[in-house]
Image (cartoon, grey):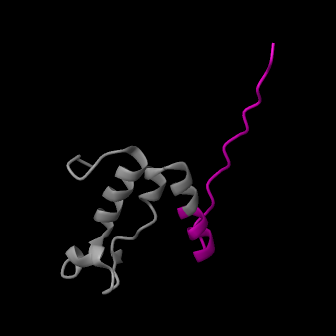
Amino acid sequence: MRRFLIAPTPAPPGAHTPEEALRLLEWCWNRRDAVRYAKLPTADFRFVFSPLDPQGTAYRDQPWTREDELISARHLFLGGDATSRP
């Protein structure tokens, strides 16, 4: 009988420094961890699109907020589309 060893899942990095926060962001994306990812953006999070980015036109007057980011991440990590409820 063959036995398979399952490597333990590495613990997520801390977020005490900017470098660690970026490693945690990468960790969450690679593992599609929406719960931990939701703890990263602060309440005042705003993403500002470049004026040259045509995909950002819808957000010129109304910025991409923390809630927009979390909805988008949940759809990316867990599935869903523009008509799905978060």
Find residue 43 and report its horizontal and vertical position in percent: 34, 71
Q: Main secondary structure of the magenta part?
A: loop
Above or below, 24 against 46 in this view is above
Find residue 28 and report its horizontal and vertical position in percent: 53, 55
Q: Left or right? Give the position of 6 relative to 82.
A: right
**Closest to the observer, 56 or 74:** 56
Q: Quadrant of residue 20?
A: bottom right
What segment is highlighted magenta in the picture?
A: 1-25
Q: Residue at x 81, y 12 (%)?
A: 1
Q: Residue at x 29, y 64 (%)?
A: 68
Above or below, 81 against 3 in this view is below
Q: Left or right? Give the position of 83 relative to 70.
A: left
Q: Left or right? Give the position of 60 relative to 40.
A: left
- Is 17 part of what is drawn in magenta? yes
**Closest to the observer, 59 or 71:** 59
Q: Residue at x 76, y 26 (%)?
A: 4
